Image (cartoon, rainbow, N blue to C red):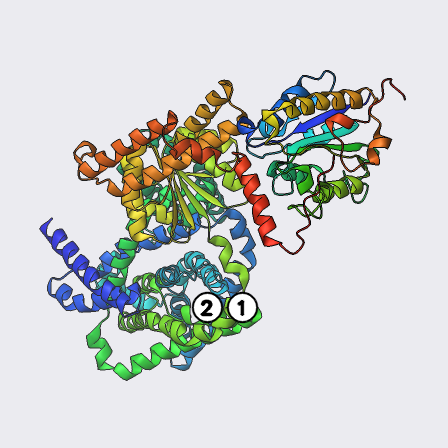
């Protein structure tokens, strides 16, 4: 069993629909750790020791957040700045996170086709997430294809959200049970509810 | 009684008029007093006032001054001064005394008289020099510290001089003394008040080693009183909460120690100084300073007036040229000795000149020694009159030398002096008024961040407790300007007002904005109205004592009611912003002279706010809730569409149709 921790970050939790539903789902999955970052640190006073301890006792670190201005909500940045210390996560003798995995689960308001050279966002979503990708690499962690919900403002009206939330549970359980096929996922830019690379049976 | 009132009136009028004028002209307070004395002298002669005995009484001001100097000097600092005290002081007294004696012999005086003159003139004026140094803020400079070392040594040296002088007596003069009437004797008796008289002397009949033993016992007693007895006594007095009792107690301490020193044949000034040093670490230090301070100032002023009044102008004008020449010669000689010593002891730059010019006069101990020499038949009366005049003239000239230092010498070294970084460390501290639940936390935060604080509290129970934990606090009522001054408000960067009494806090703010507008104020308010009062008094950084905790309680409640913690945080922040903005506007409308309910514009605005806040709370108004949520409400679909359209319009060139996969 992989030890999985989900970090959920949304400053406007009450107004959120997609992320709120996803967070509710994640918090109900057994045998994984779930942290609501904004609930735990409403005044941004992050407990560095506790956070580092959390990272050390888990194998997969999943960050769930809405993409704000092509980046994370500010508390996630604060968390990175403080917790991923040199001498711990990188730099001289900073190898404590080496071998772990970083997984993202993000929502974007724009439609999928906006995130391309021709689309109005002009770049693929992965391009906007490269700072996190390189952060993971520098810490010796592998960075897997993000689990993405596009058109997140449309989603609540239809079945798309239900599908996405259900897929999210599958993703978390698959990672937990070592049934998630990271190798296949690594070949893709993003993964979605309808094409999750999971296996039926546990394979060590 | 009437005579006393008349005298007091005369002295006070002279002082009150002359000192401000002299200060305005940049001459310093000492010269002002001296001039006042000169102006008064014909009147005093007419009234047949015994100026000399008043002078001896006023010399007690010197004792008080040394007590205050001691208070500012911790034992550690005194120990660090020891080589200067003994080396510099000893050499100054010894070398000056011998040189002056030699000159006196050249001028035709017999050896015994010459030596006595040497002793009289070797001493400088503690009163003038320390007063001026303090006034100019030069006490902590190298020159100031050196001057102080020499003055302290001189003060101690007076005792062996008094013992030695009778040995120089000339038999014919001694015979003549009783014939001259009890006058000379009376002077000596008077000098016991504040000077160095011997008539109370209880050790006169003892042998050498017994004397030594008594001396050591007396000094040990002063230390014991200072270390063990003062704290419980002061605490006991403080419980009575009567300010004058504290003043009386402080006076009692100084007078008692002076008396003890006289009884065992030591210098009362030295005793008071030692007592001051012992108490320098006490929490009652600032209170003692501000209690004794006014007495010291008045007595010294009186002393300077009597010096001015005792100048014998008939004698002066009879041989004006001679006296001026002798006085200048004396000051030149003393100054040259100081200059020489300053080279040996590596006192540099402006400090060297401060030291040499400052100590070039003869001093009040010269008066004491002169009357003593006359009484003991060492110096004939007419000569002593002339010497007395020289002492007085040199004292009169000293303020002028300080002006020379200020105008001509200090500016030349100003640039060099400015680059020396050491003067700043005494400044920039934070004064905290009140060390209860509120001020105590402020103090701990500031100390933890490495800032220097001076804490004042008027509850001695607090002090006892805090002392145990090593917190540096001082006893005293922080609303008293003199105590604030003693605590260093003039150099402070900030005053934190955390005293319990509402009116007193407001009053303190009013005082500070008027007299110390450069000191930043952090004021604690008890409630909303108090905020307005403090605002009206001039405070701008006002903290309501229970507001923050109430806000936190509200936030806790919101969280417990199921609000997301970050949401609760945003809500309460919105409330705080709103409340603060309203409060500021209402503070401007508030008028301390009109009761709030009669202040129409205030009531109007307050009602408006209450209505608006209610609406906001119930979601009818955009005010409060929106403030908290802005930025986190997601964009709408229209926003996304608009964005898409705008981007297309911007880049019509690559108008390739949007590819739709699947």
The subunit carrying tag 1 is B
- Residue B120, given in percent of the width and then of the height, sits at 38, 67
| Badge 2 element | helix
Q: Residue furthest front?
A: B657
Callout 1 touching callout 2 (CB < 8 Å)? yes
Give me the disc on residue A18.
none
Please identify the quarter of the rendering in which residue B588 is found: top left
Between the residue at mark 1 and the residue at mark 2, the CA separation in whole angstroms equals 9 Å
- For mark 2, does the 10 Å Cα neighbourhood hold few (<14), some (14 to 19), or many (20 or more) residues? many
Please determine whether, in this image, residue B43 is positioned above or below residue B569.
Answer: below
- Residue A38, given in percent of the width and then of the height, sits at 59, 30
Give me the disc on residue B355.
2
- Residue B597, given in percent of the width and then of the height, sits at 19, 31
- Front residue of B491/B498: it is B498
Please determine whether, in this image, residue B353 is positioned above or below residue B304.
Answer: below
Comes first in the chain, label 1 or label 2? 1
- Front residue of B188/B222: it is B222
- Front residue of B158/B406: it is B406
- For mark 1, does the 10 Å Cα neighbourhood hold few (<14), some (14 to 19), or many (20 or more) residues? some
Horizontal side of A187 relative to A73 (left or right) equals right
The subunit carrying tag 2 is B
Give me the disc on residue B347.
1
- Residue A101, given in percent of the width and then of the height, sits at 80, 32
Please determine whether, in this image, residue B216 is positioned above or below residue B440.
Answer: below
| Badge 1 element | loop
* Residue located 51% across and 34% down the image: B633
Q: Quick check: can you spot residue B231?
A: no
* Residue located 66% across and 42% down the image: A114
Q: Quick check: can you spot residue A21?
A: yes
């Amino acid at each position: 069993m992989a030890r999985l921790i989900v970090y959920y970050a949304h400053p406007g939790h009450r107004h959120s629909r997609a992320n709120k539903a996803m967070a509710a789902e994640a918090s109900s999955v057994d045998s994984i750790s779930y942290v609501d970052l904004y609930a735990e640190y409403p005044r941004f006073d992050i407990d560095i020791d506790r956070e580092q301890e959390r990272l050390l006792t888990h194998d997969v670190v999943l960050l769930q957040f809405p993409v704000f201005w092509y980046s994370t909500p500010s508390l996630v940045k604060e968390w990175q700045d403080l917790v991923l210390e040199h001498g711990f996560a990188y730099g001289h003798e900073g190898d404590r996170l080496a071998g772990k995995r970083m997984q993202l689960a993000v929502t974007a308001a724009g439609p999928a086709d906006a995130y391309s050279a021709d689309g109005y966002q002009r770049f693929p979503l992965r391009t906007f997430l490269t700072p996190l990708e390189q952060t993971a690499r520098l810490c010796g962690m592998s960075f897997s294809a993000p689990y993405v919900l596009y058109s997140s403002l449309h989603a609540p009206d239809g079945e798309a959200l239900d599908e996405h939330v259900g897929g999210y549970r599958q993703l978390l359980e698959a990672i937990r049970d070592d049934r998630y096929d990271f190798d296949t996922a690594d070949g893709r830019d993003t993964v979605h509810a309808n094409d999750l690379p999971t296996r039926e049976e546990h394979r060590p | 009684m009437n005579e006393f009132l008349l005298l007091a009136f005369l002295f006070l009028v002279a002082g009150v008029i002359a000192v401000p004028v002299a200060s305005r002209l940049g001459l310093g307070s000492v010269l002002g007093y001296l001039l006042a004395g000169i102006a008064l002298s014909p009147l005093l002669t007419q009234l047949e006032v015994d100026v000399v005995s008043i002078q001896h009484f006023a010399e007690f001001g010197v004792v008080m001054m040394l007590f205050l100097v001691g208070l500012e000097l911790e034992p550690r600092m005194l120990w660090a001064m020891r080589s200067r005290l003994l080396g510099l002081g000893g050499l100054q007294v010894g070398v000056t005394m011998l040189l002056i004696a030699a000159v006196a012999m050249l001028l035709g005086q017999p050896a015994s008289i010459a030596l006595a003159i040497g002793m009289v003139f070797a001493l400088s004026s503690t009163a003038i020099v320390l007063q001026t140094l303090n006034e100019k803020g030069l006490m902590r400079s190298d020159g100031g510290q050196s001057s102080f070392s020499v003055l302290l040594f001189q003060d101690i040296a007076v005792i062996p001089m008094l013992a030695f002088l009778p040995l120089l007596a000339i038999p014919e003069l001694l015979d003549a003394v009783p014939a001259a009437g009890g006058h000379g004797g009376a002077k000596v008796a008077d000098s016991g008040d504040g000077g160095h008289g011997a008539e109370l002397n209880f050790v006169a009949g003892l042998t050498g080693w017994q004397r030594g033993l008594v001396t050591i016992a007396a000094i040990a007693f002063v230390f014991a009183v200072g270390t063990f007895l003062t704290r419980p006594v002061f605490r006991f007095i403080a419980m009575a909460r009567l300010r004058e009792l504290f003043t009386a107690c402080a006076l009692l301490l100084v007078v008692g120690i002076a008396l003890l020193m006289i009884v065992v044949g030591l210098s009362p000034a030295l005793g008071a100084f030692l007592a001051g040093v012992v108490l320098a670490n006490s929490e009652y230090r600032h209170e003692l300073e501000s209690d004794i301070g006014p007495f010291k100032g008045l007595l010294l002023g009186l002393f300077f007036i009597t010096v001015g009044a005792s100048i014998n102008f008939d004698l002066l004008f009879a041989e004006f040229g001679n006296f001026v020449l002798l006085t200048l010669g004396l000051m030149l000689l003393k100054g040259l000795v100081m200059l020489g010593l300053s080279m040996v002891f590596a006192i540099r730059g402006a400090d060297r000149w401060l030291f040499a010019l400052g100590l070039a006069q003869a001093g009040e101990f010269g008066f004491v020694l002169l009357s003593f020499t006359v009484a003991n038949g060492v110096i004939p009366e007419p000569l002593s009159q002339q010497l007395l005049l020289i002492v007085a003239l040199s004292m009169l000239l000293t303020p002028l030398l300080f002006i020379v230092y200020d105008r001509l010498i200090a500016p030349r070294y100003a640039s060099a002096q400015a680059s020396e970084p050491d003067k700043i460390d005494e400044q920039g501290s934070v004064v905290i008024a009140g060390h209860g639940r509120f001020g105590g936390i402020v103090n701990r935060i500031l100390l933890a961040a490495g800032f220097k604080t001076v804490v004042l509290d008027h509850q001695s129970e607090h002090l006892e407790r805090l002392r145990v934990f090593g917190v540096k606090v001082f006893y005293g009522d922080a609303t008293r300007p003199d105590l604030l001054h003693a605590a260093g408000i003039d150099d402070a960067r900030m005053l934190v007002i955390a005293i319990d009494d509402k009116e007193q806090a407001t009053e303190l703010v009013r005082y500070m904005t008027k007299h110390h507008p450069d000191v930043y104020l952090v004021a604690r308010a008890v409630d909303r109205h108090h905020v307005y009062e403090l605002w009206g008094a001039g405070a701008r950084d006002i903290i309501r004592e229970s507001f923050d905790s109430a806000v936190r309680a509200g936030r806790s409640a919101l969280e417990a009611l199921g609000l997301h913690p970050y949401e609760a945080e945003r809500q309460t922040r919105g409330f705080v912003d709103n409340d603060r903005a309203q409060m500021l506007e209402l503070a401007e409308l508030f008028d301390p002279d009109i009761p709030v309910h009669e202040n129409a514009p205030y009531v109007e605005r307050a009602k408006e706010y209450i209505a608006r806040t209610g609406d906001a709370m119930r979601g009818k108004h955009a005010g409060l809730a929106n403030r908290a949520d802005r930025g986190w409400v997601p964009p709408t679909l229209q926003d996304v569409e608009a964005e898409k359209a705008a981007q297309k319009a911007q880049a019509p060139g690559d108008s390739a149709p949007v590819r739709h996969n699947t």
